[in-house]
Image (cartoon, rainbow, N blue to C red):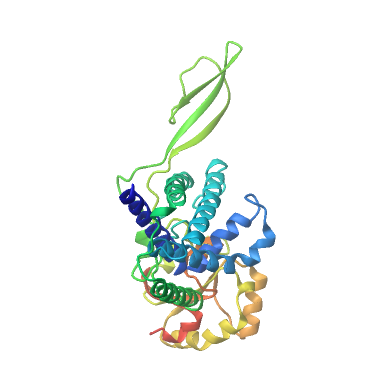
Amino acid sequence: MKYIYQIARIIVGALFIFSGYVKLVDPLGFSYKLEEYFGPGVFELEFLVPLALPLSVFIVIFELLLGLTLLLGFAPKFTRWSLLLMIIFFTFLTFYSAFFNKVTDCGCFGDAIPLNPWQSFYKDLILLVLILFIFFKKQYLKPILPKSVAFVVFLIAFVVSGYLSYYGLNHLPVVDFRPYHIGANIPESMTVPEGAQKAVYNYHWKFNIDGEEKTITTQGSYPQVDGELIEYETELVDEGYIPPIHDFSLEKNGEDYTEELMAEPQLLMIASYNLSKSEIEAWKAIQLVLEKAKSKGYKLIVLTSSGIKAQNIINEQLQTELDFYFADETAIKTIVRSNPGLLVLNKGTIKQKVHWHDAEDLEF
């Protein structure tokens, strides 16, 4: 029993540290996921949306430190109760999300390991069993270091966690798990390889046969049935292969310029998911960089989900004429964790990517 307990302790502690870390380096990404949970159609807690970012930072640091205290055997009573309450909450959250199909990716492991709702729920269910075992067999939770040493380790981890979070918010994540990382080629990442598995659907055909309603299920073909078709419904069985990038586009005045712009050898793309939420200081800070890039022959574009009114405000405040293209807000948030953020591309390959705070670090 003692050895089983230690194995459970290591598994739970390591998972909490890993889960906390991959979200800690990208606190903005987890805050977007919290906004999704708080938003309409899920928990309807819109009043919590402005608190999504501070809650994101608190939760991920708390999660990482809980995993550490469990491994260290530090503050055992607090650790056991915190683990239990946290896993009960997340198990409920993932079950609700899966059962009602509210959020397609829980964000449990950030962008490092995407999980669908049912996978997230089963993962939490296993963790719940392990944590219940850890909770009730508390006599086996022994410290591995003297209390004073464990406290120093805890304090160092807290400071490092705070720094990683700060860095991720004011620069960019130290590790980029998203498909738009430096070195990625966007057009190639949008391509579906030959022979890749296609999506599979069940078609539920409802017929009136001799006065009775009967449902016949096929995977596409129309049933050979003597009867009157009433209606049919489709059900996704297997989504098949989904390319790493599947929601990227560059549109202007209703036309798609993605292929043309991704062929540009020198492209500076400024991504701002919402112009009204960006700081005018940010645009002023990058203005000299934009002028430098233009003088070097780079094509400059702004990718945003904002409309003409917000675009005109930016142009008026900067006394310039930026070239705006439209894209989905969620896609832009995925491209870069900065509003605005800057990317240098060569024929669709991301060569450089920076937060607006670091715009001067770009090389042309």
Image side of residue 132 versus residue 101, left or right: left
Residue 346 image-quadrant placement: bottom left
Question: Farthest residue toward the front?
Answer: 139
Task: Report the label total.
Answer: 0
Q: What's the residue at 37%, 47% (across, down)?
A: 241
Q: Is residue 116 visible?
A: no
Residue 261 lies, in percent from the top left, at 43, 69
Asked if residue 233 can be seen in this view, the reply is: yes
Q: Nearer the viewer, residue 121 or 347?
A: 121
Q: Quadrant of residue 320?
A: bottom right
Residue 87 drawn above or below residue 316: above
Q: Position of residue 358 (x, y in %)?
A: 46, 83
- Which residue is the extreme one toward the top? 210
Residue 179 sits in which quadrant?
Answer: bottom left
**Vertical order, 362 against 239 (above or below):** below
Pick whichever, 341 or 24, lies toward us.
24
Front one among 225 and 68: 68
Q: Nearer the viewer, residue 170 or 196?
A: 170
- Quadrant that contains the C terminus: bottom left
Q: Which residue is pictured at 63% across the width and 72% down the height?
A: 277
* Left or right position of 266 against 282: left
Q: Position of residue 136 (x, y in %)?
A: 46, 48
Q: Residue at x 54, y 86 (%)?
A: 285
Q: Position of residue 181 (x, y in %)?
A: 38, 68
